[in-house]
Image (cartoon, helix red, strand yellow):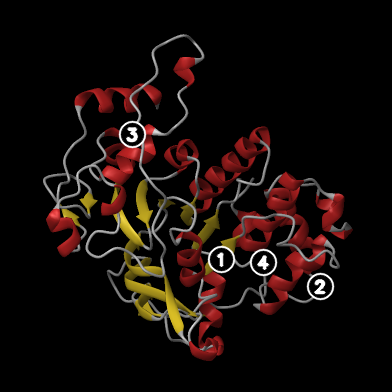
Amino acid sequence: MTTTAIETGSGRAKRGVPRVPGAPLLELQDLVMHFATRGDGLLGRKTSKVQAVDGVSLTVREGESLGLVGESGCGKSTTAQLITRLLKPTSGKILYQGNDIARLNERALRPYRREIQLIFQDPYSSLNPRHTVGSIIGTALRTHNMTAKGKELARVQELLEVVGLNPEHYNRYPHEFSGGQRQRIGIARALAVQPKIIVADEPVSALDVSIQAQVMNLLEDLRKEFGIAFVFIAHDLGVVRHFCDRIAVMYLGRIAEIGNRDDIYGAPRHPYTQALLSAVPDLGTVRGTPPKARIRLVGDPPSPINPPSGCRFRTRCWKAAEVCAKEDPALTRRNSPQEVACHFAEAPEESIIADLRADA
């Protein structure tokens, strides 16, 4: 893999994205996404709102990888679609290099779309089965005028080689490739426009375990080689720990805890984070060692249509008190390196810390 394979290409379009000096690469400020749903009221006209994302604030710096974890339905994928502006937020700001793109129309968004790309979860449905690989990748090149006339094929073959595929297979269709190979095609499509940030929405969850490692190693190589920043969404906490510099834990549309990887995994402060990490499969039991301490949450996550008052985690939290129902805890540093949204944010007991570190 060579840097020139990504950065070269006569006819490359000039980037039209201005930058505010000193601004981070990406910043979300109090981002909200509510979906209206029709209820069972008179004539079916009663509506309610699904609070998929409700006040998320995040920062991503150049070249870093931010992991976004949480249970299914917590709003991770919706956040990914907001960052890439596949969805227009209900309120809040999406600052890319200091410029708010939350309300831009499609024409104004075009230069930003070159720099913010998305890798989809499903490598089977994310590629058009009627188009060849060359056409799929070439469409991105043509749309953004990334290559000179007559150079598109050579550029497509370069990108296929970068992601570990045979350059001569540009004329094949997606069904002729395996799942791992299809995901590599999706990665090549994202790389074609030379992005500065890639949002990876569970890019390996649909792949076999052996193939997952290969794709993760490819993403890590691309991040180091070309300085691409990542927002990496996943359920596998082991994969997140391996790939991400910082971790944001999401619960029911909000950030529960965010901090550096070592702080989150070494001494989680939010009860939900502690419960997530304690649920990581323990290979020690296979070797005959005593099982680690587990934190078992009671009940199911509340509905995002009618979330609990105050702290959204309080209905499943063993530390919940009266104040948790009355006051929504702010995401702040509470005598810890990471930011935590909890009235009773404390370091876990030493026995839990020891188990988590031993399991890492």
What separation in Å lies between label 2 and label 1 (alpha carbons)? 25 Å
Query: At which x and y percent is residue 266?
Result: 28, 33
Query: At which x and y percent is residue 83?
Result: 46, 69
Q: Which of marks 2 and 1 is in front?
A: 1
- Whether residue 245 is visible to the viewer of this picture, yes or no, is yes
Q: Name the residue under label 2.
A: 150
Q: Which of marks 2 and 3 is in front?
A: 3
Check disc 3 and report its element: helix, strand or loop.
loop
Q: Which mark is residue 9?
A: 4
Residue closer to the observer: 276 or 247: 276
Residue lying furthest front? 42
What separation in Å lies between label 4 and label 2 (alpha carbons)? 11 Å
Residue type at mark 2: give it.
Gly
Check disc 1 and report its element: helix, strand or loop.
strand
Q: Which comes sooner in the sequence, label 2 or label 1? A: 1
Quadrant housing residue 254: bottom left
Q: Which comes sooner in the sequence, label 3 or label 1? A: 1
Residue type at mark 4: give it.
Gly
Residue type at mark 1: give it.
Gln
Q: Which mark is residue 117?
A: 1
Q: Which comes sooner in the sequence, label 1 or label 4? A: 4
Q: Which comes sooner in the sequence, label 2 or label 3? A: 2
Q: Name the residue under label 3.
A: 295
- Whether residue 147 is visible to the viewer of this picture, yes or no, is no
